[in-house]
Image: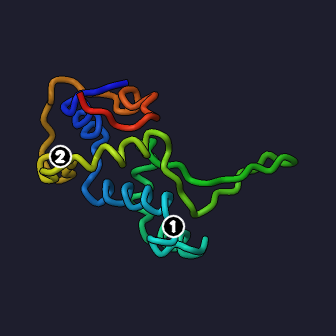
Amino acid sequence: MTMSQTEILAALRAFRLTEGEWNTLTVLRDIEEDPEACGMSTSYALREWCRANKGALDMLILSGLVARDHAVSFTTGDVEWFDNCNATEQGEWAASAVNMVFDWDEFTFDPEAEETDAGGSVDPLSVTAGCNEGVHFV
């Protein structure tokens, strides 16, 4: 799927994430690509980073860009949630696409700003579905 730069920015903006949340997503992607370069050579370091960034990670989980690790017991069916998180396929796409943003003040969501109707909303997950081959500009 090839999208124009305008379509990509519209899809990313529809997630309504703050600059800090976008930053957390890109750092998580960097950690997944090279944990040692990010100082996350142990599972304890990653777990502590996830705990320190819990608020931003919670928003990223709600937006579908990040998933929390878990295990299911085959005998009881109970779910055990872990403190580690991973970017979803859409999260990896969004983290690589957000690198083209230069005007963060205009791009990021400001929860304090007054809401305006932008002529309809875009469902960001439907736009990013199937974008596993990366970002391609037209």
Q: Position of residue 4 (x, y in %)?
A: 23, 28
Q: Secondary structure at mark 1?
A: loop
Residue 54, above or below 133:
below
Q: Position of residue 97 (x, y in %)?
A: 31, 43
Q: Quadrant of the N terminus?
A: top left
Q: CA distance from mark 1 to mark 2?
A: 28 Å
Q: Residue at x 63, y 61 (%)?
A: 82
Q: Is residue 53 left or right of residue 107?
A: right
First along the sequence among labels 1 and 2: 1
Q: Position of residue 10 (x, y in %)?
A: 23, 33
Q: Secondary structure at mark 2?
A: helix
Q: Is residue 10 left or right of residue 46?
A: left
Q: Residue at x 36, y 56 (%)?
A: 26
Q: Give the amino acid type for the residue marked by disc 2 in the picture.
A: Phe
Residue situated in front as seen by the camera: 127 or 110: 127
Q: Which mark is residue 35?
A: 1
Q: Is residue 49 left or right of residue 135?
A: right
Q: Position of residue 118 (x, y in %)?
A: 15, 29
Q: Give the amino acid type for the residue marked by disc 1 in the picture.
A: Pro
Of tags 1 and 2, which is closer to the observer? 1
Q: Which mark is residue 107?
A: 2
Residue 37, above or below 10:
below
Q: Quadrant of the C terminus?
A: top left
